[in-house]
Image: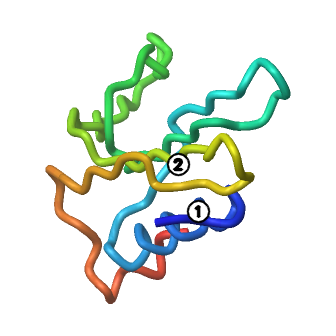
Amino acid sequence: MKFDTLHQGISFYKNYARVSGFDNRLYSTKKRKSDGKISLKHYVCNKEGFRKTQRVQSNSKKKRPITRMWYNSRITLKLINDQDNYIIFSFHEGHKHPLTTPNSAHHIQ
């Protein structure tokens, strides 16, 4: 699939995620050194991966549960070199958690 702008590609995935019943987050961005233009952008399900550091302070009474799982649900948008268009370079759909029902989908941003 081809998009005229990066924003259109991001909007497409965010809308897909909302309709499918999951929330997403930015995973990484890569820029070209020559002109600073974004060449790759990765978005993942908000429950994908593991946190690198523990965010709970040791003196905290309430421990936050671990909500992330290791699986590969993501989309990668790639800049086409000779044009200013973006394509879906890779797309993985697998989720290991229950998705939100249509009645609860309004809670997803």
Asked if residue 50 lies left or right of residue 18, the reply is left
Question: Would you name the residue on which mark 1 appears?
Answer: 9
Residue 88 in the image: above or below residue 22 = above
Q: Identify the residue at image location x=55%, y=43%.
A: 26
Residue 63: which disc? none
- State yes or no: discs 2 and 1 in contact (Cβ < 8 Å): yes
Residue at 71%, 51% (x, y): give it: 83
**Front residue of this view, candidates 22 and 28:** 28
| Kind of residue at disc 2 | Leu
Is 109 placed left or right of 22 in the picture? right
* Nearer-the-camera pick, 70 or 87: 87
Number of marks: 2
At label 2, counting other C-alpha atoms closer than 10 Å, the crowd grade (few under 14, some 14-19, many 20 or more) is many
Residue shown at 55% from the left, 44% from the top: 78
22 in relation to 39, above or below: below
- The residue pinned by badge 2 equals 77
Residue 28 rendering spot, x and y as whole percentages: 55, 32
